[in-house]
């Protein structure tokens, strides 16, 4: 397991410090160390990022193991086993996902770092764009859906706060991407994947919403877009997004940990959805895969 938190550049960019944005790998003369009284030493920053990322990876493993025995109990698999208290699903999505947005915003607004490198800023923008969409736009557009158990929502809030803190702490406080990272194949391809993934996810969520008339709550066969290839088109888009984000950050440990979490959570759930459709609809398209076109 990779345990460094910085992108794999040469030493000129490995140590988090101020004022290195415009340095490139060609910089030979090291700058004098800047005053860092207000920030943690670089090793402490890295230790914290590594520890938090490893905890997230462990949690992803736990979620995956639990998915072998049960289906994540919200939406079509909602269950009273987790308490009879439920809340409307749009409220649940708003509370849990906006908590990620606000936590990251808090980290950004309270930083003592004097300047955040431009690449970090762009990665942060991608992160905020996703959570603005998921935390505010998605719940606003949602059609009538199954209520969420309050217990599951509170769990999700804890996870989202943790995730928002980790990603923002890494990008705001710990990482220093040099400006030439913008022109690397990993950043360009990763950002493109992120955008395509976000578009696919939003379009698929839109297609799902259009399946229900007002007041309806049943399930129909999703059609169109990526749903012609997979049962869980929105999850495929989400996977592309976060693996693209991880690639754009050159597989920083926080981004990679979250991409692994997304895969270990959404692939089993997408396979459950696939089985659900196959059992419910006799005429379900036979050539449709569960979550990854032509593969799975
Ligand atoms: N990054 C992550 O770790 C993560 C984790 C989970 C979800 N997400 C994202 O959050 C969004 C929502 O996730 P989700 O798990 O709730 O997705 P989902 O199970 O596909 O449900 C999405 C919405 O569409 C409705 N719906 C789904 N299939 C339908 C059908 N066949 N007919 C009619 N309505 C249908 C659902 O209603 P019901 O609620 O009534 O079933 C729900 O309102 C997705 O974009 C997903 O990618 C991200």
Image: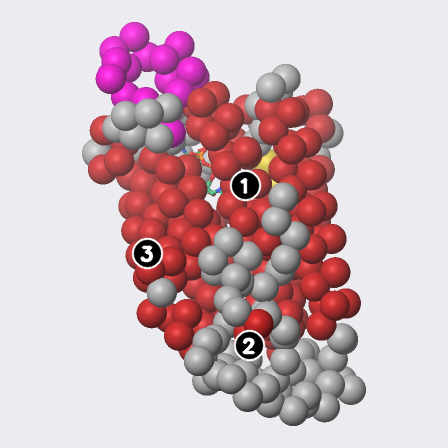
Q: Quadrant of residue 286?
A: top left
The crowding category of the residue bearing disc 2, from other C-alpha atoms within 10 Å (few below 14, some 14 to 19, many at least 20), is some
| Residue that carries the numbered disc 3 in the rendered image | 189
Q: Residue lying farthest front?
A: 28
Q: Between disc 3 and disc 2, whose residue precedes?
A: 2
Q: How many marks?
A: 3
Is 2 a magenta residue?
A: no
Camera-side residue: 183 or 92?
A: 183
Query: Gap in Å between the C-alphas at discs 3 and 2?
Result: 24 Å
What is the span of residues highlighted in magenta in the rendered image? 274-291
Residue at screen point 29% across, 39% down? 207
| Residue that carries the numbered disc 2 in the rendered image | 12
Query: Gap in Å between the C-alphas at discs 2 and 1?
Result: 29 Å
Q: Between disc 2 and disc 1, whose residue precedes?
A: 2
Position above or below: 276 against 90: above
| Residue 168 appearing in the image | no
Q: Quadrant of residue 270?
A: top left
The crowding category of the residue bearing disc 3, from other C-alpha atoms within 10 Å (few below 14, some 14 to 19, many at least 20), is some
Residue at screen point 37% across, 17% down? 277
- Using the image, tell me which numbered label, if any, was put on residue 260: 1
Residue 115: x and y in percent read 57, 85
Camera-side residue: 291 or 188?
A: 188
Residue 234: x and y in percent read 37, 39
Asked if disc 3 is less than 8 Å from ligand 1, the answer is no
Residue at screen point 44% across, 80% down? 26
Name the chief secondary structure element in magenta. loop
Q: Between disc 1 and disc 3, whose residue precedes?
A: 3
| Residue 177 appearing in the image | yes
Mark 1: which secondary structure? Answer: helix
Position above or below: 135 against 204: below
């Amino acid at each position: 397991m990779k345990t460094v938190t910085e992108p794999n550049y040469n030493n000129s960019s490995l140590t988090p410090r101020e004022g290195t944005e415009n340095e490139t790998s060609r910089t030979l003369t090291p700058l004098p160390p800047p005053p860092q009284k207000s920030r943690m030493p670089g090793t402490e920053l890295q230790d914290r990022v590594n520890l938090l990322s490893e905890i997230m990876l462990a949690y992803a493993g736990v979620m995956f193991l639990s998915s072998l025995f049960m289906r994540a109990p919200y939406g079509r698999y909602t269950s009273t086993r987790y308490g009879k208290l439920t809340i409307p699903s749009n409220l649940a999505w708003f509370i849990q996902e906006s908590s990620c947005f606000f936590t990251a915003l808090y980290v950004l607004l309270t930083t003592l770092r004097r300047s955040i490198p431009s690449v970090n800023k762009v990665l942060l923008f991608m992160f905020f764009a996703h959570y603005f969409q998921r935390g505010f736009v998605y719940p606003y557009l949602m059609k009538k859906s199954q209520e969420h158990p309050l217990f599951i929502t509170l769990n999700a809030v804890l996870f989202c706060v943790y995730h928002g803190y980790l990603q923002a702490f890494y990008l705001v406080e710990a990482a220093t991407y040099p400006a030439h990272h913008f022109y690397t194949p990993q950043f360009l391809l990763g950002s493109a994947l992120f955008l395509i993934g976000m578009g696919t996810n939003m379009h698929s969520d839109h297609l799902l919403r259009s399946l229900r008339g007002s007041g309806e709550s049943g399930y129909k066969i999703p059609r169109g877009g990526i749903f012609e290839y997979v049962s869980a088109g929105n999850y495929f888009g989400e996977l592309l997004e976060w693996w693209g984000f991880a690639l754009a950050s050159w597989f920083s440990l926080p981004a990679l940990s979250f991409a692994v979490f997304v895969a270990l959570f959404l692939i089993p759930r997408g396979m459950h959805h696939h089985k659900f459709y196959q059992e419910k609809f006799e005429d379900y398209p036979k050539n449709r895969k569960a979550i990854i076109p032509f593969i799975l």
